[in-house]
Image: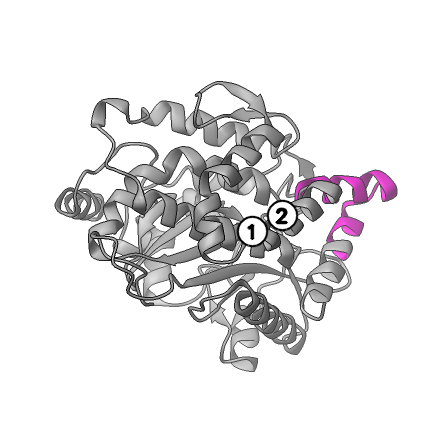
Amino acid sequence: MTACRGACGARVAVRKIGVEEELLLVDPETGRTTAVAQHAVRAEPEVEAELYLQQMESQTPPVSTLTEVAEELRLERQGLVDAAEAAGAAAVAVGTPVLVMDDVAFTPTDRYRRIRDEYGELASSALACATHVHVDVTPDEAVHVVDGIGPWLPVLLALSANSPYWQGRDTGHASWRSQLWSRWPTFGTGQPFGDRATYDEVAGRLVDWGAGLDPGMVYLPARLSPRYPTVELRVADVCTELGDTLLLAALARALVATTAAAPATPPVSAWRSELVRAAMWRAARYGISEQLVHPATRDLAHADEVVDALVAHVRPALEEHDDVDAVRDLLGALRARGTGATAQRRTFERHGDLAEVVHDLRRRTAQAAVD
């Protein structure tokens, strides 16, 4: 990816974004997860394997406009749907398995076998699907963005919440995926690094101490990508509706750009990690249906107020990228129908059957590729 601007503010190029989506593979008849990712990947070379054979991943190339993001997301989603069908399965964009599943099957690579062996039950009970958004940064911006972006990340989680069910039961959360993922020993929130040397030292010690096997397992909610010159935002559930994914991409880019342009914050004003973690939990628990932590006041406020505050906070960056109208429309659509978690619970209320929740997710996942 190509960085947007240097520390001096001189414009280099448009700040590009890329999106990764993880989807579950389910049996078309029963709706239960099925371990056929190897067959799916062979059918569609653009589709990538993940840690589990019940899961696969796609990623868009780096692009400059939301129109391009939308086009690439549809292409990638269609590739996932086609790959699943070729393997006799269905692709489902949902954060966690809705129905009771058999034991997870790990993708048979040396790295994934090591993860299974080293982390035991932690690895065996972490099947979950996320959306990751990569945003261009320069080397001078990178750690400053990671340090400053944290208090706003729970808002992105709340908007994406799409995992209320976990193996046959309602978890009472809008995003159970985020709670599963927060158990990894490299998951961290809130502590500022200050400079790249400190970031690299912390990431290196996490690997040296075995908390992660390699830099790819440093699971910070916002991290420096091990592969690209980007900040990678890793807080969102995978979204069934591609419009929600597009909204996340636009807000993520604007949030990175806004944070990059802000002056460095004195360490004394940084949020304690306990407070960021609590704010993240509220977002996971309620989505946008109740109060969230307002990053500007550090008080509880209605989710609508907090989301509006995020949009206002990043509005200059949205204007710079001509994304204001798109964000207004996408956010209006999300608010009108509710989050993915709300949609799943409404389906269950209508049918009283979690299998119908999966079938509805399957239909909407496929439809999103052609809309």
Q: Is residue 164 left or right of residue 108?
A: right
Residue marked by disc 2: 328
Looking at the image, is 127 positioned above or below residue 176?
A: below
Q: Is residue 121 left or right of residue 146?
A: right
Q: In which quadrant of the rendered image does the N terminus lie?
A: bottom left
Of residues 320 and 119, which is closer to you in this image?
320
Of residues 55 and 291, which is closer to you in this image?
291
Examine the image and state in which quarter residue 286 appears.
top right
Looking at the image, is 5 positioned above or below residue 83?
A: above
Residue 216 percent coordinates (x, y): 31, 56
Q: Amino acid at mark 2?
A: Arg
Q: Is residue 348 magenta?
A: yes
Residue marked by disc 1: 324
Counting other residues with Cα less than 10 Å from the Cα at mark 1, is it few (<14), some (14-19), or many (20 or more)?
Answer: some
Counting other residues with Cα less than 10 Å from the Cα at mark 2, is it few (<14), some (14-19), or many (20 or more)?
Answer: few
What residue is at 43 percent from the left and 26 percent from the top? 296
For label 1, the SS is helix
Q: Amino acid at mark 1?
A: Val
Q: Is residue 77 magenta?
A: no
Looking at the image, is 295 positioned above or below residue 26?
A: above
Residue 124 percent coordinates (x, y): 47, 48
Circle 1/circle 2 CB separation < 8 Å: yes
Q: CA distance from mark 1 to mark 2?
A: 6 Å
Q: Which residues are magenta?
A: 340-359
Dot label at residue 249: none
Residue 211 percent coordinates (x, y): 27, 43
